[in-house]
Amino acid sequence: MSEAFHIVSDGSCDLPAELAEKKNITIVPFYVSFDDEHYLKENVDIGIRDFYQQMVDRKGVYPKSSMPSAQDYEEVFKPFAEAGTPVICICITTKFSGSMQSAVNARQALLEDYPNAEITIIDATVNTVLQGLYVLEAVRLRDAGVSYGDAAARLEEIKGTGRIFFTVGNMEYLKHGGRIGKVGALAGSVLDIRPVITLKKGEIFPSGIGRGRKRSTAKATDLLVTYLKKSRLGIDCYSIVIGYGYDIEEGKEYRDSVVRELQDQGFDVKEIPTCQIGATIGVHTGPYPLGIGVIEKAIHG
Protein backbone atom coordinates (compact mmCIF):
# COMPACT_ATOMS: atom_id res chain seq x y z
CA MET A 1 0.00 0.00 0.00
CA SER A 2 1.40 3.42 -0.93
CA GLU A 3 1.94 6.06 1.74
CA ALA A 4 -0.45 8.96 2.19
CA PHE A 5 2.70 10.91 3.02
CA HIS A 6 6.32 10.16 3.84
CA ILE A 7 8.06 11.20 7.07
CA VAL A 8 11.53 12.72 7.12
CA SER A 9 13.50 13.97 10.13
CA ASP A 10 16.99 15.25 10.72
CA GLY A 11 19.38 13.17 12.79
CA SER A 12 18.66 15.13 15.95
CA CYS A 13 15.65 12.84 16.49
CA ASP A 14 18.02 10.10 17.71
CA LEU A 15 15.78 7.26 16.59
CA PRO A 16 17.69 3.99 16.25
CA ALA A 17 18.37 3.15 12.60
CA GLU A 18 16.49 -0.15 12.80
CA LEU A 19 13.41 1.56 14.25
CA ALA A 20 13.48 4.29 11.61
CA GLU A 21 13.68 1.63 8.90
CA LYS A 22 10.85 -0.39 10.45
CA LYS A 23 8.62 2.69 10.68
CA ASN A 24 9.57 3.88 7.17
CA ILE A 25 11.16 7.14 8.34
CA THR A 26 13.99 8.75 6.38
CA ILE A 27 16.71 10.30 8.53
CA VAL A 28 18.93 13.12 7.24
CA PRO A 29 22.07 12.85 9.39
CA PHE A 30 23.99 15.58 11.16
CA TYR A 31 27.78 15.63 10.94
CA VAL A 32 30.24 15.43 13.82
CA SER A 33 33.94 16.28 14.02
CA PHE A 34 36.65 15.89 16.64
CA ASP A 35 39.27 17.97 14.80
CA ASP A 36 37.32 20.76 13.03
CA GLU A 37 38.44 19.33 9.67
CA HIS A 38 36.98 15.90 9.12
CA TYR A 39 33.22 15.75 9.51
CA LEU A 40 31.54 12.36 9.73
CA LYS A 41 27.88 11.56 9.20
CA GLU A 42 26.38 10.40 12.47
CA ASN A 43 25.23 6.76 12.39
CA VAL A 44 26.68 6.43 8.87
CA ASP A 45 30.40 7.15 9.24
CA ILE A 46 30.49 7.06 13.04
CA GLY A 47 28.21 5.21 15.46
CA ILE A 48 26.87 6.94 18.53
CA ARG A 49 28.61 4.49 20.85
CA ASP A 50 31.96 5.25 19.20
CA PHE A 51 31.23 8.97 19.43
CA TYR A 52 30.68 8.78 23.19
CA GLN A 53 33.67 6.49 23.67
CA GLN A 54 35.88 9.07 22.00
CA MET A 55 34.50 11.78 24.27
CA VAL A 56 35.23 9.67 27.34
CA ASP A 57 38.70 8.64 26.15
CA ARG A 58 39.77 12.08 24.90
CA LYS A 59 39.04 14.46 27.75
CA GLY A 60 39.60 18.07 26.82
CA VAL A 61 38.67 17.45 23.19
CA TYR A 62 35.35 19.07 22.38
CA PRO A 63 33.63 17.67 19.29
CA LYS A 64 31.45 19.83 17.08
CA SER A 65 28.37 19.07 15.06
CA SER A 66 27.33 20.44 11.69
CA MET A 67 23.84 20.54 10.25
CA PRO A 68 22.69 18.75 7.11
CA SER A 69 23.08 20.81 3.95
CA ALA A 70 20.32 21.83 1.56
CA GLN A 71 21.82 19.31 -0.86
CA ASP A 72 21.42 16.56 1.74
CA TYR A 73 17.73 17.36 2.05
CA GLU A 74 17.24 17.79 -1.67
CA GLU A 75 18.58 14.30 -2.33
CA VAL A 76 16.05 12.91 0.17
CA PHE A 77 13.07 14.96 -1.02
CA LYS A 78 13.55 14.51 -4.76
CA PRO A 79 12.33 10.87 -5.16
CA PHE A 80 9.11 11.73 -3.33
CA ALA A 81 8.60 14.87 -5.41
CA GLU A 82 9.04 12.75 -8.54
CA ALA A 83 6.59 10.15 -7.26
CA GLY A 84 4.02 12.71 -6.18
CA THR A 85 4.21 11.57 -2.54
CA PRO A 86 3.74 14.36 0.03
CA VAL A 87 6.45 14.75 2.68
CA ILE A 88 6.31 15.91 6.28
CA CYS A 89 9.81 16.84 7.42
CA ILE A 90 10.43 17.41 11.15
CA CYS A 91 13.53 19.38 12.12
CA ILE A 92 15.34 20.23 15.35
CA THR A 93 14.34 23.48 17.05
CA THR A 94 15.55 26.44 15.02
CA LYS A 95 16.93 27.99 18.22
CA PHE A 96 19.66 25.30 18.21
CA SER A 97 20.41 24.72 14.54
CA GLY A 98 19.90 25.90 10.98
CA SER A 99 18.85 22.42 9.88
CA MET A 100 15.30 23.57 9.17
CA GLN A 101 16.57 26.37 6.95
CA SER A 102 18.53 23.82 4.93
CA ALA A 103 15.29 21.86 4.48
CA VAL A 104 13.40 25.01 3.47
CA ASN A 105 16.09 25.88 0.91
CA ALA A 106 15.93 22.36 -0.51
CA ARG A 107 12.16 22.58 -0.80
CA GLN A 108 12.38 25.90 -2.65
CA ALA A 109 14.94 24.50 -5.06
CA LEU A 110 12.84 21.43 -5.81
CA LEU A 111 9.69 23.44 -6.42
CA GLU A 112 11.38 25.00 -9.44
CA ASP A 113 11.50 21.59 -11.13
CA TYR A 114 8.51 20.01 -9.36
CA PRO A 115 6.01 22.83 -8.80
CA ASN A 116 3.37 20.40 -7.53
CA ALA A 117 5.61 18.85 -4.88
CA GLU A 118 4.05 18.84 -1.41
CA ILE A 119 6.64 19.24 1.33
CA THR A 120 5.68 20.50 4.79
CA ILE A 121 8.61 21.41 7.04
CA ILE A 122 7.94 21.59 10.77
CA ASP A 123 10.05 23.20 13.47
CA ALA A 124 9.80 20.57 16.21
CA THR A 125 10.75 23.22 18.83
CA VAL A 126 12.44 20.29 20.62
CA ASN A 127 15.36 18.00 19.93
CA THR A 128 17.00 14.65 20.66
CA VAL A 129 14.89 11.78 22.02
CA LEU A 130 11.81 14.00 22.44
CA GLN A 131 12.06 14.93 18.78
CA GLY A 132 12.11 11.18 18.20
CA LEU A 133 8.83 10.79 20.11
CA TYR A 134 7.35 13.62 18.05
CA VAL A 135 8.39 11.90 14.82
CA LEU A 136 6.76 8.69 16.05
CA GLU A 137 3.54 10.63 16.60
CA ALA A 138 3.71 11.56 12.92
CA VAL A 139 4.03 7.84 12.19
CA ARG A 140 0.99 7.14 14.36
CA LEU A 141 -1.04 9.64 12.32
CA ARG A 142 0.18 8.27 8.99
CA ASP A 143 -0.50 4.66 9.95
CA ALA A 144 -3.98 5.57 11.22
CA GLY A 145 -4.84 6.86 7.75
CA VAL A 146 -4.92 10.55 8.67
CA SER A 147 -4.51 12.75 5.62
CA TYR A 148 -1.35 14.72 4.87
CA GLY A 149 -2.93 18.08 5.65
CA ASP A 150 -4.69 16.94 8.81
CA ALA A 151 -1.57 15.20 10.07
CA ALA A 152 0.55 18.32 9.59
CA ALA A 153 -2.07 20.40 11.41
CA ARG A 154 -2.27 17.97 14.34
CA LEU A 155 1.51 17.88 14.66
CA GLU A 156 1.53 21.67 14.92
CA GLU A 157 -1.11 21.44 17.67
CA ILE A 158 0.80 19.07 19.93
CA LYS A 159 4.37 20.28 19.60
CA GLY A 160 3.95 22.98 22.23
CA THR A 161 3.26 20.28 24.83
CA GLY A 162 6.78 18.87 24.49
CA ARG A 163 9.12 19.13 27.46
CA ILE A 164 12.58 17.77 28.25
CA PHE A 165 13.69 17.73 31.90
CA PHE A 166 17.37 16.84 32.14
CA THR A 167 20.74 17.22 33.79
CA VAL A 168 24.36 16.78 32.72
CA GLY A 169 27.46 15.16 34.18
CA ASN A 170 29.25 18.49 34.63
CA MET A 171 29.22 22.01 33.26
CA GLU A 172 32.33 21.97 31.05
CA TYR A 173 30.67 21.11 27.73
CA LEU A 174 27.83 23.62 28.22
CA LYS A 175 30.44 26.26 29.04
CA HIS A 176 32.64 25.40 26.08
CA GLY A 177 29.72 25.36 23.63
CA GLY A 178 28.38 28.70 24.81
CA ARG A 179 25.03 27.13 25.72
CA ILE A 180 25.27 27.95 29.38
CA GLY A 181 23.48 31.32 29.68
CA LYS A 182 21.10 31.55 32.63
CA VAL A 183 21.79 27.92 33.47
CA GLY A 184 25.39 28.72 34.35
CA ALA A 185 24.42 31.72 36.44
CA LEU A 186 22.17 29.47 38.46
CA ALA A 187 24.65 26.65 38.98
CA GLY A 188 27.69 28.84 39.53
CA SER A 189 30.98 27.11 40.16
CA VAL A 190 30.12 25.34 43.42
CA LEU A 191 31.63 21.88 43.59
CA ASP A 192 29.30 19.10 42.43
CA ILE A 193 26.35 21.42 41.83
CA ARG A 194 24.57 20.34 38.69
CA PRO A 195 21.84 22.21 36.87
CA VAL A 196 18.42 20.80 36.15
CA ILE A 197 17.26 22.15 32.82
CA THR A 198 13.91 22.34 31.05
CA LEU A 199 13.64 22.57 27.29
CA LYS A 200 10.31 23.84 26.00
CA LYS A 201 9.15 25.70 22.92
CA GLY A 202 12.65 25.70 21.48
CA GLU A 203 14.62 27.11 24.40
CA ILE A 204 16.33 25.92 27.56
CA PHE A 205 15.48 27.28 30.99
CA PRO A 206 17.08 26.69 34.41
CA SER A 207 14.76 24.64 36.62
CA GLY A 208 16.81 24.20 39.76
CA ILE A 209 20.07 22.72 40.93
CA GLY A 210 21.08 19.54 42.70
CA ARG A 211 24.16 18.53 44.61
CA GLY A 212 25.22 15.26 43.03
CA ARG A 213 23.71 13.09 40.35
CA LYS A 214 20.89 11.49 42.30
CA ARG A 215 19.45 14.74 43.56
CA SER A 216 19.57 16.42 40.18
CA THR A 217 17.92 13.47 38.43
CA ALA A 218 15.30 13.27 41.20
CA LYS A 219 14.54 16.93 40.53
CA ALA A 220 14.02 16.14 36.85
CA THR A 221 11.57 13.41 37.86
CA ASP A 222 9.74 15.87 40.12
CA LEU A 223 9.38 18.26 37.18
CA LEU A 224 7.74 15.51 35.13
CA VAL A 225 5.34 14.65 37.96
CA THR A 226 4.39 18.32 38.36
CA TYR A 227 3.85 18.70 34.62
CA LEU A 228 1.58 15.66 34.45
CA LYS A 229 -0.41 16.68 37.54
CA LYS A 230 -1.09 20.10 36.08
CA SER A 231 -2.30 18.63 32.81
CA ARG A 232 -5.99 18.39 31.97
CA LEU A 233 -5.18 15.07 30.28
CA GLY A 234 -4.41 11.68 31.80
CA ILE A 235 -0.98 10.10 31.56
CA ASP A 236 -2.31 7.74 28.86
CA CYS A 237 -2.52 10.79 26.58
CA TYR A 238 1.24 11.35 26.75
CA SER A 239 4.30 9.68 25.30
CA ILE A 240 7.30 9.58 27.65
CA VAL A 241 10.92 8.56 27.03
CA ILE A 242 14.12 8.42 29.06
CA GLY A 243 17.21 9.75 27.28
CA TYR A 244 20.74 8.80 28.31
CA GLY A 245 24.26 9.31 26.96
CA TYR A 246 27.28 7.07 27.35
CA ASP A 247 26.04 5.07 30.33
CA ILE A 248 23.35 2.64 29.16
CA GLU A 249 22.95 1.04 32.59
CA GLU A 250 22.43 4.39 34.25
CA GLY A 251 19.70 5.10 31.68
CA LYS A 252 17.91 1.87 32.58
CA GLU A 253 18.25 2.46 36.31
CA TYR A 254 16.88 5.97 35.95
CA ARG A 255 13.99 4.67 33.84
CA ASP A 256 13.09 2.21 36.61
CA SER A 257 13.21 4.95 39.24
CA VAL A 258 10.94 7.21 37.16
CA VAL A 259 8.41 4.41 36.70
CA ARG A 260 8.40 3.73 40.45
CA GLU A 261 7.94 7.40 41.30
CA LEU A 262 5.08 7.79 38.84
CA GLN A 263 3.38 4.73 40.28
CA ASP A 264 3.88 6.07 43.81
CA GLN A 265 2.23 9.30 42.67
CA GLY A 266 -0.82 7.38 41.47
CA PHE A 267 -0.11 7.29 37.74
CA ASP A 268 -0.95 4.11 35.86
CA VAL A 269 2.32 3.45 34.05
CA LYS A 270 4.11 0.13 33.68
CA GLU A 271 7.04 0.87 31.43
CA ILE A 272 8.82 3.74 29.69
CA PRO A 273 11.19 3.30 26.74
CA THR A 274 14.81 4.43 26.85
CA CYS A 275 16.76 5.92 23.95
CA GLN A 276 20.34 7.06 23.56
CA ILE A 277 20.90 10.78 23.08
CA GLY A 278 22.91 11.34 19.92
CA ALA A 279 25.87 13.46 18.90
CA THR A 280 23.84 16.50 17.84
CA ILE A 281 23.07 17.27 21.48
CA GLY A 282 25.89 15.24 23.03
CA VAL A 283 28.51 17.70 21.77
CA HIS A 284 26.89 20.34 24.01
CA THR A 285 26.07 18.21 27.06
CA GLY A 286 29.10 15.93 27.23
CA PRO A 287 28.89 12.15 27.55
CA TYR A 288 26.56 12.02 30.55
CA PRO A 289 23.24 13.73 29.80
CA LEU A 290 20.26 12.11 31.48
CA GLY A 291 16.63 13.14 31.40
CA ILE A 292 13.01 12.71 30.43
CA GLY A 293 11.04 13.71 27.36
CA VAL A 294 7.25 14.03 27.35
CA ILE A 295 4.76 15.12 24.69
CA GLU A 296 1.03 14.79 24.10
CA LYS A 297 0.05 11.94 21.82
CA ALA A 298 -1.35 12.89 18.43
CA ILE A 299 -4.15 10.34 18.82
CA HIS A 300 -5.65 9.64 22.23
CA GLY A 301 -6.74 6.17 23.20
Image (cartoon, helix red, strand yellow):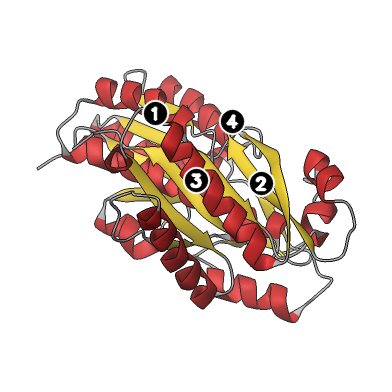
Q: Quadrant of residue 237?
A: top left
Q: Position of residue 20 (x, y in %)?
A: 34, 55
Q: Which mark is residue 111?
A: none
Viewer-nearest of discs 1 and 4: 1
- In contact (CB < 8 Å): disc 1 and disc 4: no
Q: Which residue is mark 3?
A: 224
Residue displayed at 35% across by 56% down: 263
| Element at label 2 | strand
Mark earlier in primary sequence (1, 2): 1
Instruction: Looking at this view, name the residue that lies furthest to the right.
Output: 189
Callout 1, which amino acid? Answer: Ile
- In contact (CB < 8 Å): disc 4 and disc 2: no
Residue 156 visible in image: yes
Give whichever of 66, 215 is nearer the camera: 215
Give whichever of 5, 135 is nearer the camera: 135
Mark earlier in primary sequence (4, 2): 4
Mark earlier in primary sequence (3, 2): 2
Q: Position of residue 83 (x, y in %)?
A: 24, 34
- In contact (CB < 8 Å): disc 1 and disc 2: no
Q: Which mark is residue 101?
A: 4
Viewer-nearest of discs 3 and 2: 3
Label 3 Cα crowd, 10 Å radius (few <14 / some 14-19 / many 20+) = many
Callout 4, which amino acid? Answer: Gln
Distance in Å between CA atoms under marks 1 and 4: 22 Å
